[in-house]
Image (cartoon, helix red, strand yellow):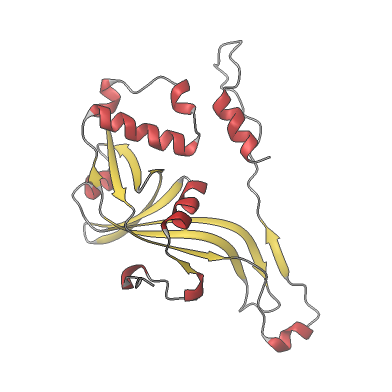
Amino acid sequence: MEKVPEKIRVKRVPKRGIYDKETIYKILDKEFICHVGFVYHDSPVVIPTLYGRKNNDLYLHGSMASRMMKSLKEGIDISISVTRVNGLVLARSAFHHSANYESVVLFGKAYLVEGDEAKNEALKYISDHIIEGRWEEIRQPNAKELKATMVLKIPIEQASAKVRTGGPVDDKPDYELNIWAGVVPFNRVIEAPIPDEKLSGGILVPDSIKNYEELYK
């Protein structure tokens, strides 16, 4: 078995650590908001932002004036985390309360995506990651918008997943207590789309939105 690098090894409850790429990809593909950690002017900063995955790369986009984007494009060390909470795990004791979750922590450096064609393609990756098919339904970015947008690529090379499933695990004596214990599951619900009040009459809900709703029924 290949040795797991120290930097990405799960230390707390190591049996929950998962290191194969397919599991990491599946968790990343369930979400579209990540938290990016980096050092800015000698101070730690964590910023939430949208992302997209394509193959073994994660893509971020933002304003050319963004402090995060300008810092990351310099090749500094960064950490990115993604978490999906699937339920609250309620134990008999306060100490053993927990949550069921799937998470990924990624370490690495960002690389600038250059050229209008490459930027446009990367922006499509992000759009399709969030709602597949939406890119084909909308106006594409023009030259001015592309110039104002920075796109970064982060290879998924140093990453680990951590997953918790199942019910509470209490101390043996606590199982005799007259206290309810169990799991409160979370399910994502997509509600009916609300049309823009300035939408012209006769424009129907597009296929990308219909297909997105179907995923969560």
Question: Which of these two is toward me, 34 or 157?
Answer: 157
Question: Which of these two is toward me, 136 or 85?
Answer: 136
- Residue at the left extreme, as displayed: 74
Q: In which quarter of the image is residue 167?
A: bottom right
Evaluate whether residue 82 shows in this view. no
Image-based side of 213 in relation to 75, left or right? right
- Residue at the right extreme, as displayed: 178
Evaluate whether residue 134 shows in this view. yes
Q: Quadrant of residue 43?
A: bottom left
What percent of the width, then of the height, locates residue 146?
A: 28, 27
What percent of the width, then of the height, locates residue 15?
A: 50, 74
Above-or-below relation of 121 to 106:
above
The residue sitting at 26% across, 27% down in the picture is 117
Image-based side of 158 in relation to 94, left or right? left
What percent of the width, then of the height, locates residue 140?
A: 37, 21
- Residue at the top extreme, as displayed: 201
Q: Specify the quadrant that holds the C terminus.
A: top right
The residue sitting at 42% across, 71% down in the picture is 10
Q: Specify the quadrant that holds the N terminus.
A: bottom left
